[in-house]
Amino acid sequence: MKLLKRINGRTAIIVAGGLLTAYLALILTVTNLGQSKLEESQRQSLSLKIRNYTDNLSFFFDVSQQNLANLASNQATTTYFANLAAGMSVKYGLGSSLFNLEQTIGGYMHSSKIDNLPIYKRVRVIGLGGTSIIDTGDGLMPPGPPVPLKEMEHHRKRIEISKTESGVSINLLHTIYHQNKPVAVLVAEVNNDVLIYQLSIQEHKSSKSCLSLLTPLGGIKVWNTLTPDTPVLASPPPAMSANTQLIYLEKLVKGTPFKLISWYEPVNNQDIFTSTWFIAAISLLAVPVLAGLVFLMRVYNANLVLQTEIAVAAEQQKSLAEKNALLSQEVDKRRASEMELAFRAAHDDLTGLANRQAGMAALQRAIDKANVSGNSVLVMFLDLDNFKQVNDTVGHHAGDRLLIQTSERLQRAIRHTDTLARFGGDEFMLIIPELSGQDAARVLAHGILSLFEEPFNHDGQEFFVSTSIGMAMYPQDGDTPANLLKKSDAALYRAKETGRNGYSFYDANMNQDLQRKLALNVRLHQAITNDELDVHYQPIVDLKTGQIVAAEALMRWTDRELGFISPAEFIPLAEKNGLIHRLGDIVLQQACHQAAQWQALAPLAIAINFSSVQFRQCEQLQQRILQVLAEVGLPPDRLEMEVTESIFIEQDTCLINTLNHLKSVGVQLSIDDFGTGYSALSYLQRFSFSKLKIDRSFIQGMTNNVADRSLVNAMLAMAKSLDLKVVAEGIEEQPQADYLNLLGCEYGQGYLFSRPLSAAEFTQLLQSQALQIA
Ligand code: C2E
Ligand code: MG
Ligand code: MG
């Protein structure tokens, strides 16, 4: 089976072609060999035949000569010549002896036959004088060729050839002697037919051959079936000599001057199976067979190519199918990941709500629809109140849960045509298309606020969170998503300002606020560049002694066009646009420099406010503070850093390290505006603050408001327990100072003691105080 498998069509064809070629070569070789062998044997047999002919002829002449000799010496002959020599008269005895001789010669002629063919045409006896004694020819016969009588006197026998009209004539001559003297010549003219007969006895009409007996005077045509019309051939005919394939043989006839020449057609020329034509035909026959094989080979090759192509195509198809399968898997995967990416790109990870980008796109669609229907679109911007505090106290996880629950509550409350999006942090946007008017919006806003009346839950812990809502409407408040968002943000800001857990519609004044914010933004840049910012100082006094113990540096900016701008307005702005870092640096430098100079007048500390935003670059801030202190030569313990509780909302290790490091070099830390922000209080234990500044809102309400008073009491008690000194901010009246002093509050700050003063004014104040002490 293995062998069969190896022998494919191609090999089979090649082998067949090879075998056929070998077979043909063998046939040709064998045929050629056979042919030459045949030719050789033919030549040999022909040669034998020719030899046989010539031997026969030679024998014929020998016998004929002998017969003539006998005749020349027989009784009749000797009697006649004896009578002649004796001078016997014809009448008496010569006549009868001549008659007798004539009879003898005639009988001899008559009896000399071969296969009924007379051997002699004519026998004559010619006397040496030239007289014809006997002539068997009739009177019509020509006198016959001259006989060389003179020569015959010396020769006993001779074959004489002469040329006659009818061709070549052969005469056998024999000298007749009487008493050893030549007296006459016996001349016997040989019948050429006898010669021809003897020389062609073995020839057949069918055999192609040509024989001639050559004599010195010409040839005798013996046999010619090659070119029958040609007369005697003395030499090979031109046509024959050209045909070199004819077998030529020649042989001398012993004892005669004759030569037998002959041509024979070789047997292969006669035999179709050995002829050149046959071989050529066989060879020609092989051509189509070989051509067929070549064709088969080509067909096979074409088949092979086709099969290979089919196999390759099948292989390609298979690998293509595999690739296709992989590709479609890849496409599916990619489609799935693209869909996921697209979903992620448009959705918020935490809540699954539309994100800012998708929300804005939805708003654009709502605007487009409203353009057609002529309805209004309400944009509600929501921000959870105190979300950061929840995040910080209960943890980020709780913050996330709160956001998820908020989104679930909101989703349940809205229609399917409305769109809810989360804008990041605790900000949500709600788009309500096809709204009839402000009243409907109000109802909706109330409904949203009421969603937050229920407590939120995390790990069994309940807590309340409210929200503030800012609303803007299309088309009256803005015509683009960005514009409407800005307006609703402004309204939200207002809602926050007015106490939170409420809503606010956008109005034109808010726009003015926005304009002002924009203007301030630009002008604050210029103010920094043009050095238009100033620092004022407000004293912090010891409530017991009234002595100034510290000065709080407060930034002052009076714009040429906008007039005095409160830090409460531009500081949050600077926090947003990043200018707070530069502002903070200006204050740090000026205030520290000033405080260093004041050390000569009083050992007071300088309190500088630091925004939580400044701590986002905590390392640089720390380096800068230490650098400035070193530059101006202010002892670190004379610097009090005022920070609000908000810095602890985003606690990170950098902030903690910075505060700890500054504390370790002696810098004091104060909690500013204590009580207004989110008071987790736990941070108070974690950081070693030196002072706590109770926000002025508590101080001012303290005299009239029992709750504020008790809060202040509680704050003071707490500070005491944490070993913190307390500064009461915003003391405007003496009773407040007295009451706080009574409660053990160490320091006070407020208009009662002094408004914030310029550096020069503050210097004067310090000087006057120094004078008083002195
Ligand atoms: P703050 O640190 O609590 O500063 C005390 C604020 O209360 C000052 O307002 C001061 O003028 C005001 N004040 C003091 N005593 C009284 C009083 O008896 N009655 C009333 N009604 N107000 C009083 P100011 O200067 O407008 O600053 C507002 C806030 O801006 C500051 O509150 C502080 O948080 C921030 N701020 C001011 N300057 C800077 C600054 O250089 N850097 C930073 N980060 N914040 C600053
Ligand atoms: Mg302050
Ligand atoms: Mg304050």
Image (tube, rainbow, N blue to C red):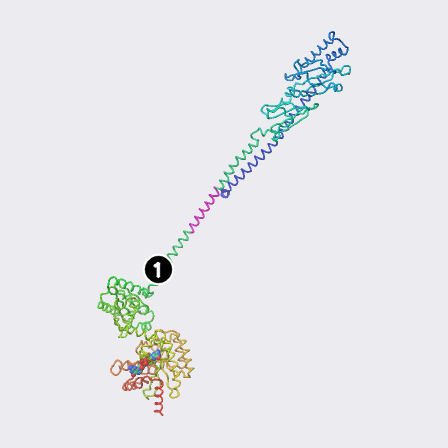
Classify residue 233 as left or right of residue 454: right
Classify residue 444 as left or right of residue 68: left
Q: Amino acid at mark 1?
A: Met
**Where does label 1 land, which residue?**
339
Q: Residue 647: image x %, image y %?
A: 35, 76
Out of 216 and 727, give the one closest to the viewer. Answer: 216
> Vertical placement of 599 versus 180: above or below?
below
Residue 730 visible in this rendered orientation of the protein: no
Out of 519 and 667, give the one closest to the viewer. Answer: 519
> Regarding ligand 1, which quadrant of the image does it lie in?
bottom left
Majority secondary structure of the magenta segment?
helix
Assign a secondary structure to mark 1: helix
Residue 90 visible in this rendered orientation of the protein: yes
The magenta stretch spans residue 307: yes
Q: Residue 734: image x %, image y %?
A: 28, 87
Q: Residue 460: image x %, image y %?
A: 29, 69
**Callout 1 environment at 10 Å: few (<14), some (14 to 19), or many (20+)?**
few
The magenta stretch spans residue 692: no
Quadrant location of the C terminus in the rendered image: bottom left
Q: Residue 458: image x %, image y %?
A: 30, 69
Extent of the magenta region: 299-319
Classify residue 450 as left or right of residue 324: left
Classify residue 434 as left or right of residue 269: left
